[in-house]
Amino acid sequence: METSYATVFKRFQRFIWRTRIVKRKMSFSWFSFSALLIVYSCFKLRPIPSQKYTAIAERGLPAFNKTQCKRNVSDLAGPISPKLEPIEKSNLISLFPSLKGGGRFSPNCSPSWKVAVVIPYRNRWNHLNILLQNLIPVLMRQKIDFGIFVIEQEKGNIFNKGVLYNAGFLEAQNRWDCFVLHDVDLIPLDDRCLYHCNRFNPVHMVSGLNKWNYTLMKGPYTDDSPLFGGVVALTKQQFLQINGFSNLYFGWGGEDDDFSVRVRNVSFPTLRYPANICRYDMIKHLRDKGNDDNPLRRILLKTTTARQQQEGLSTASGLYHVTHRETLPLYTWITVAVDFKLIHSKYCKKASPDE
């Protein structure tokens, strides 16, 4: 039976007597009694109406009315056939009316991770639209809380994917705790390949690529370990500990191998999904103009360990600046100018292809 207010009041009087407070000749006014009733009612922990929980969630505090996200097998399609035909941006926007500005989506449940998908970009409109047409439905079915960031390098300099990944992380880090670094030409073939992070180790999402008959080629520049790159998921803490990507790789090749060495140097084992699940198709394309082979990549790879704490994410903010930022229906678009001359004079002036 629930304790009455009168009983509570009597118990409180006895407590005062025993602690000799009564000797101070305190008298209980009706105000004191009312205050006691308020305290007692608070401890009863009456449930708050659900509409109040909704108001709390809308203010950005924990949404107590949301249950933890659970993925049912019926929610996922498993192996999927990619849609590789070009699609206009306007048609792509119409396919996803539930997306908010910046390509943001929140499921009607409480997810484990807030995921930022970071895509380095230059001159690949068709590839970007094809990727989003295939990727966004996968993320939605997986009940991922996500936002999409396209990081474009301004024209005029040789492409530097490492700087773009570092810039994407720095520009998006405040709200997100999991970062998926995603090449623009890799299309997922199975939605059981979950786009979220592991709390202990980075996750290499690509377990097989059509380019190599859905296997992974061994690293050509470092050792016999499989290639590490294309699509990688890391927590904020892991990316900071690794010190991000090197900023020194201009042109094609070497930056993913350098990153792989950085990951191993901080004793992170590489996690991969089974080869029959995390398969990707690479969109066929010619080499981009301004992304020629990097003649210094083999030389730079010999100094990865020595450079790891001296250059990377920790130095990237001084090597680029944002020239344009816009929140669009499908993504947040960020254009950056990379300071080629500063990087070359500060880090690469002693290196040459003949060394």
Image (cartoon, rainbow, N blue to C red):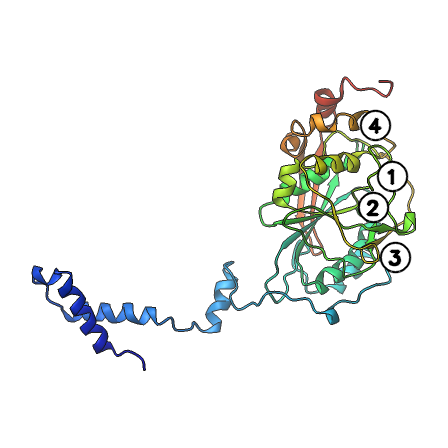
Relative to 175, is 136 above or below? below
Q: CA distance from mark 3 to mark 2?
A: 14 Å
Q: Secondary structure at mark 2?
A: loop
Q: CA distance from mark 2 to mark 1?
A: 9 Å
Kindly identify which numbered label has been placed on residue 83: none
The kind of residue tagged 4 is Arg
Kindly identify which numbered label has been placed on residue 84: 3
Q: Secondary structure at mark 3?
A: loop
In this rendered view, identify the residue nearer to me: 205 or 152.
205
Q: Residue at x 15, y 61 (%)?
A: 19
In front: mark 3 or mark 2? 3
Q: Which numbered disc flags the more N-terminal residue, 4 or 2? A: 2
In front: mark 4 or mark 1? 4
Do the residues under discs 3 and 1 have CB atoms within 8 angstroms? no
Total label count?
4
Q: CA distance from mark 3 to mark 4?
A: 34 Å
The kind of residue tagged 3 is Leu
Q: Residue at x 79, y 42 (%)?
A: 228
Residue at the spot of label 2: 124
